[in-house]
Amino acid sequence: MSSQYPLILKSISKTLPNGRELFADISLSLSSGEFVSIQGESGIGKSTLLNLAAGLDTSSKGEVIVAGQSLAGLSETELTGVRGRNIGFVFQAFHVLPFLNLIQNVSLPAILTGNTRDLALHKAADLLNKVGLGDRTQSLVSELSGGELQRVAIARALVHSPTLILADEPTGNLDPSTSSEVMELLTNTVKSTDAAMILVTHSAIDAASADRRLIMTATGMRDLDG
Amino acid sequence: MASLRQNDKSGPIWRWLFIGQLRTFPFRYIFAVLSIAIGIALGFSVHLINASASDAFGDAVRNLSGSSDAQVAGATSLGFDEQLYTRIYQLPEAADVSPVIEMSAVLGETEARIKLIGIDPFRAGAITPVLIGRQVISDEQSAGRTGGQPSFNINAVYLSDAALDLSKTKVGSFVKIRANGAIHDFQVAGDLPGIEAGQPVAVIDIAAAQWRFNRLGVLDRLDIKRAENSTQSSLARALGKMLPSDARLSGAENEIEKRTSLSRAYRVNLEMLALVALVTGGFLVYSAQSLSAQTRQQQFALLRILGLQKSSLQRQLLLEGLALGLVGSVLGILLGYGFAYLVLAIIGSDLGGGYFSGSTGPIDVTASAIFVFSGFGIVTAILGSFSPGRRAAGLNPAQAIKTSADNLDGAKQPVWLPGTLLILLAGVLVILPAIDGLPIFGYLAVAAILAGAIWLTPWLARTLLAPLTRVSNRDVAFDLALNHLLRSPTQAAAALGGIVASVGLMIAMVIMVSSFRTSVDNWLESILSADLYVSGGLVEASFNADQQEEISKLSGIAVAEFSETINVSLDPTRPPVNLIIRPVQSSQYPLSLIATVDEERAGIPIWISEPAARIYDLEIDQNIRLPIGAGGTPVYVAGIWSDYARQQGAIVMESDDYTQLTGNLERSELAISLQNPQNIDAETERLKAQISNIAGTEPEISNAAGIRNIALGLFDRSFAITYGLEAVAILIGMVGVGATFAAQVGTRIKEFGMLRHIGFGRREIIMMLAYEGILLGLVGLAAGVMSGLAISQILVHVINPQSFNLTMKTSVPYMLLLGISAALLITSGLTAIFAGRRAAAADALRAVNEDW
């Protein structure tokens, strides 16, 4: 299902099992190719917001629409399908499988979304090339630095041509110099596709590269640029 | 639907993940495969060996029965009147009848045990041609011939190849044959090419057999060929109408069924015991898969986030289980075949039970046996993977990706209800009866107790360990170890599954065998109260009335009591029981009675053994008819006595009653109380010489201590294979503890790295793991001992009585159990320390910076 809005959040609220309201009435629409950053204090609910957007968690109120499809009422199997087809993830801790080589790691989402093994490997090789690791497709994870690992994660997030990229503190484990390299690579690579991206970050520098900068507070979410 | 289709493309991912895991943790998987393989190998080899013995015995019986359509056999080992032969021969339903004498005999100087068969060659030629000898020496060469037909030569014997080998005799030479109290020389006139290999058989003329071996006027068997115009059932009906009480309709298949039914429970028990090793292997697969799933928790979470379905994830672990089971089963089948081959070649097929001694055939591997045993292995491995797979798939991926592999589940209260229900179920199963003589519900109860105990382990771990938190002045290493175990009961359960299974079964077996042995020992002590026991020796000679009187008057003998044992068939489909003729009210030769009639009444009393009471469903004071005396004899059950020697059942009859019924005064056994028992060796020698003079043959004399030692030696021999299988199960369990612990430690490298960072030395980490090992061992031991005690009671009071028709009293070998417990705790501690060396290595310092 295609839509010009890869993600729409309609007045969503999240109340924790202990009754504490994490956030309330947050709305957000992302257009194709749009890059939004979200900043905020630790524990304010940024990662939870990403989990809601990915269908990994359910909102207490409101509606989440991914690629034109409302996640409300979908079964776990259907949610997994929506996530696999439409969303790419980049994590702070990279999460690259240590016993697979780089090309196998990157090709995983493509295989899971129904590509043949050969096509998935071909796409993975292309993306590894784009992130500057084209000559190391057969390397093992243990041979890579933190920056290189995140490049692998970026390639993996894009291999199945998702419409939405969710990046949760992608530079959180990297030094400043590597951080800026990775951020540049992430934004440029995502921009080269038509995918929208939400970047959750503590770094004002990283957030600055976004089209829209949002900040989450206890009272809700507002646009930093007015 | 689209998402389901996507998962069908995930094949390469599974291969990558599985191969990756294999590469990373090869020993974990190798061990799981070996556990399954050893279990299958043991079960399969025991099956092959038993099948080889049964087949060989069956082939031999069919071989000797030739093409007869029916057989009539004696209801007792005394045989039946030979007049029956003529009467059956005249039946229109019978085309031909061949009379047979059959005895066990001893051959030549080597004293080889053989089957001695007497036949009428004219009759046997048409029905059992395999019994017709191939004449090698000519009549002129043979000595003592009585007629033109070589087979009529009363001095000629034909030996099968096995009998020739055993007696180290050649065709043409003379050989002594001893049977039924007589010894005679025969010339080996030829061989028996029709007799299958491995069967020691000697064939002589029937007249020679009757005349020379005291069987005049009786026959043991009639092989009958039915007339062309009759049917099998009409022949059976006609025979049924005319058979006297001392003869029974029989047949080759009937004989095979009798023998195999006697040993069936023993064989099934052995196979079950072998499968115990497989069950332990299954728990180790469970441990391996649980730990593997824990290690890969974040990987699974990532895959779920990337779009992998929950069901696919569970399928992944089941497929891994399938792969482990498949490889383990193939390996197990091959190992089992090799093991069976070696055992048959070196030891033979009897496996200590004594049911098939001397019967060894080729290994016959059937597709169904391979299918069943490999199926067991595969199902066990898949079941071992089921629960870890369910747990892995049930995790919330958003949470799981952020938590380490050493995820603690301490917030959850361990459940106790399913385990308790399983144990209650076992309580119901044990009161159900055997199915077709097999204690199926008893085995299911054992499985339910094991599963229940393992299910209760997390709860037990917390219940037993929680009070330790209140102990003051603990050291930090102990504190950390205790807290880790308290907050990870599921992890603890994964490590403990193998321990509980192997310890529980080991303790149950130890108690069962000890109870059995103690009961047998006490029984022997109660029945062996005479000083000396005399039997007819190799010639199986018997003492007539005059000889008995003469022996009784020999100097040095305080009391001499004579007895006789013959076989009696109460049911043609079952092996015959032993009818023991002896003085019953004897102080030196008591019966170990467990029940008697309140008052003696009119009629002939008999005392039946406990197995006979169970097999034939007989009760105190019940009337039955024994196939002895003319037309059979009505008797009543005056008592039931315990007997561990005769699994097929035994009946004791007062000597005078037997003599009155049959007129037979011959007795072949004798119990002697000495006037001077202190000088037993010298008295034995003196009496041996004197009895030998009276009886004309040298008797066999044993003293009570010697018989007891021989009996207990036989007992230990029959349990040798049991001990062997038990040892393998324990070994798998112990190594499993080590492998599981090492794997668990592997999942906690980050924790150890962090501890090193905050000032923990290597020694403290090793100490912490040693504490964990010992605490885990204690919990495993507690669960294992409790379940072992419960299982032992099922073995003693349900499975053994239902399998072997005998009861016993529980005897717990406390010192042995104490030793086993200490060994387990030491093994757990040492294994933990050994595994901890890796954790304490320098790599751990870097581990905190790693992602996985």
Image (cartoon, coloured by chain):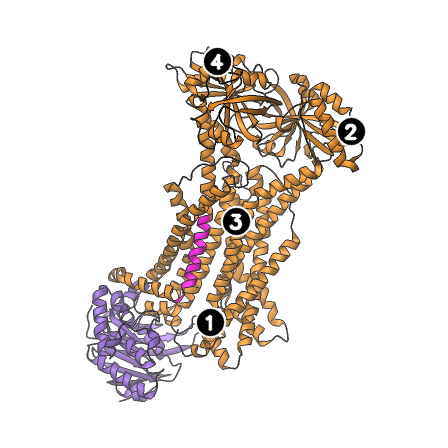
Q: Main secondary structure of the magenta part?
A: helix
Q: Which quadrant of the figure has residue B694?
A: top right
- Tell me which corner region of the image, top left, top right, bottom left or bottom right, holds residue B698: top right
Q: Earlier in the sequence, mark 3 or mark 4?
A: 4
Total residue callouts: 4
Chain painted purple: A
Query: Which residue is located at x 65 percent, y 35 percent?
Result: B642
Q: Is residue B535 above or below residue A175?
A: above
**Label 4: how many Cα within 10 Å (few below 14, some 14–19, many 20+):** many
Which numbered disc, 2 or 3, marks the residue closer to the eye? 2
* Separation of residues labelled 3 and 4 (CA atoms): 51 Å
Label 4 to label 1, Cα distance in Å?
Answer: 84 Å
Question: What letter labels the chain drawn in orange?
Answer: B
Camera-nearest label, 4 or 1? 4
Q: Quadrant of the C terminus of chain B?
A: bottom left
Circle 2 or circle 4, nearest the eye: 2
Q: Residues within 10 Å of mark 3 (few under 14, many from 20)?
A: many
Q: Is residue A32 above or below residue A204?
A: above
Tell me the number on the disc at residue B88.
4
Q: Is residue B244 visible?
A: no
Q: The magenta stretch spans which residues?
A: B24-41
Which of the two discs, 3 and 1, sits closer to the camera? Answer: 3
Q: Chain of mark 2?
A: B
N-terminal label among 2 and 1: 2
Q: Amino acid at mark 2?
A: Ile
Residue that mark 1 sits on: B748
Q: What residue is disc 2 on?
A: B557
x%, y% of residue B630? 60, 15
What secondary structure is found at the residue carrying circle 4? Answer: helix
Q: Amino acid at mark 1?
A: Arg
